[in-house]
Image (tube, rainbow, N blue to C red):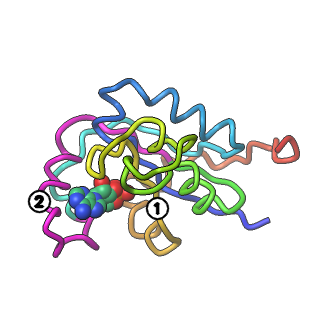
Amino acid sequence: MTKESTLVLIKPDGVKRRLSGEILKRLEQKGLNLKGLKILHLTREKAEKHYEVHKDKPFFKDLVSYITSGPIIAILAEGNNAISVVRNLVGATDGSKANPGTIRGDYSISIDKNIIHASDSEESYKHEFPIFFSASEIIPVEYGDEKLF
Ligand code: CMP
């Protein structure tokens, strides 16, 4: 077992379309532990930091405008191989190409309004986590139900 943490964002389109409950349900049903959860309106400064790796891409400006356009939900999920497990639940970046059964495959048909973001590596997680959470906002206790999954 390799216990990992990952940062998940339900983007403005996901929140506006009332998909937050469905997404939390999928994370929980898979067996991930939700250790941090908040709704927030991201500042431009934090959005630019979060998407820093894309700063030279032609879509960077639109990406930052979009993620700051409305409320988002930030989630810290933990579990066995959580980074790859959540990426698989999320599906391919472009919703029009994502497999049915994945979150983007079921609810998105574009690359920009693609509902959800999830850390793609340990390095990304370490960059992203402090943008959204302080250590005191994370539930420190274990769920203690790992054997059920
Ligand atoms: P996300 O997982 O949040 O990480 C970076 C985001 O950039 C990605 O989801 C897409 O929404 C967006 N993105 C990636 N490639 C493109 C592109 N070619 N055009 C527009 N947006 C893109």
**Residue 23: percent from the left, percent from the top?**
51, 35
Q: To which residue does mark 2 refer?
A: 61
Q: Quadrant of ligand 1?
A: bottom left
Quadrant where the C terminus lies? top right
Residue at 50% x, 70% y is 121
Kindly identify the amino acid type of the residue bearing the numbered disc 2.
Lys
Figure disc tally = 2
Residue at 13% x, 68% y is 58
Kindly identify the amino acid type of the residue bearing the numbered disc 1.
Ser
Residue at 18% x, 46% y is 66
Please tell me in which quadrant of the rendered image residue 85 appears: bottom right
- Asked whether residue 10 is drawn in magenta, I would say no
Quadrant where the N terminus lies? bottom right
- Asked whether residue 51 is drawn in magenta, I would say yes
Q: To which residue does mark 1 refer?
A: 119
Camera-side residue of 139 and 18: 18
Q: Sequence-wise, which precedes: disc 2 or disc 1?
A: 2
Indicate left or right for 26 with 111 as reference: right
Q: Residues within 10 Å of mark 1 (few under 14, many from 20)?
A: many
Camera-side residue of 111 and 82: 111
Please tell me in which quadrant of the rendered image residue 82 appears: bottom right
Residue 105 visible in the picture: yes
User: What's the magenta region?
Assistant: 49-75
**Residue 138: percent from the left, percent from the top?**
54, 48
**Residue 108: percent from the left, percent from the top?**
37, 40
Q: Is disc 2 placed on a helix, strand or loop?
A: helix
